[in-house]
Amino acid sequence: MSLLDALKWRYATKKMNGEPVPQHKVDQIIEAAHLAPTSSGLQPFRVIVVTNPALKEKILPIAYGQAQVTAASHVLVFAAWDNYTEERIRGVFSNSNKERGLPDETPSDYEVQLTGNYTTRTSEVNFNHAAKQAYIAFGMAIAEAALLQVDATPMEGFNADQLDALLGLRERGLRSVTILPLGYREENGDWLVNLKKVRTPASEFVIEYN
């Protein structure tokens, strides 16, 4: 299946059947998020994987009763850094240098410039920037799930403060951004499954300057 075919197949699944997604497929979906491009390669977010049924039950009201949360096999929570700090940026560059076999005695000019730019901004500006990077990975995970014919429901509809408290994210310097339940569609009970996929006409969607 090509990526375009997979994207035509996928939809925001409204009802899941509870069937477990094989771990190797979940691992591939997470790896797609892991390999996503991010600004300066900082990867300023983490992916939290929830499989515990009791914990999913606690997330359910936080996600305004969206039943996919508890019917899903795995619930992925994309959480962004709450701020860029010199320590976090240094950690990313130090790891990169180590993996590439490069010297790491002093920060490069680029790292110094990047750190200076980021750490002078407000934490809210930095969180919003980090959240945008998380969204890139979120899209990659959705696409990989579609290629594997694993259903997924992208969710922004939840109380982020409550989810952060439940998962202890603020203590980790993280704030939740999106949720992605993974599972398999219940075709007999999902009102959306057989409806035609509709998008803005390409003639309106694409604006060309020739």
Image: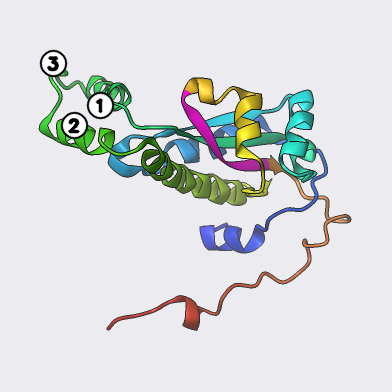
| Residue 195 visible here | yes
Number of other residues with Cα within 10 Å of mark 3, as a class: few under 14, some 14 to 19, many 20 or more = few
In the picture, residue 158 is in which quadrant? top right
Structural crowding at the residue carrying mark 2, measured as other residues with C-alpha within 10 Å and reported as few (<14), some (14–19) or many (≥20): some
Residue at coordinates 53% horizontally, 59% vertically from top-left? 2
Quarter of the C terminus within the rendering: bottom left
Q: How far from the left and from the top, in percent, is residue 169?
A: 55, 25
Residue 194 x %, y %: 78, 66
Please say if 147 is above or below 98.
below
Q: Which residue is mark 3?
A: 105
Between marks 1 and 3, how big is the CA–CA gap?
11 Å
Q: Residues within 10 Å of mark 1 (few under 14, many from 20)?
A: some
Q: Please state the horizontal and vertical placement of residue 179, each as a whole percent of the image.
A: 62, 41
| Highlighted magenta segment, given as a residue range | 173-181
Q: Residue 111 bears which disc, if any?
A: 2
- Helix, strand, or loop for circle 3? loop
Q: Residue 41: x percent and y percent?
A: 31, 37
**Magenta run includes residue 150:** no
Instruction: Name the residue: 70% across, 36% down.
Output: 21
Residue at mark 1: 93
Question: Residue 95's image quarter?
Answer: top left
Tell me the kind of residue under disc 1: Phe
- Say which mark, if any, is on residue 139: none
Do we see residue 25 in this rendering? no
Relative depth, front residue between 117 and 38: 117
CA gap between label 3 and label 2 equals 13 Å
- SS label for mark 1: helix
Which numbered disc, 1 or 3, marks the residue that appears first in the sequence? 1
Q: Nearer the viewer, mark 2 or mark 1?
A: 2
Q: Tell me whether circle 3 and circle 2 mark residues in contact (CB < 8 Å).
A: no
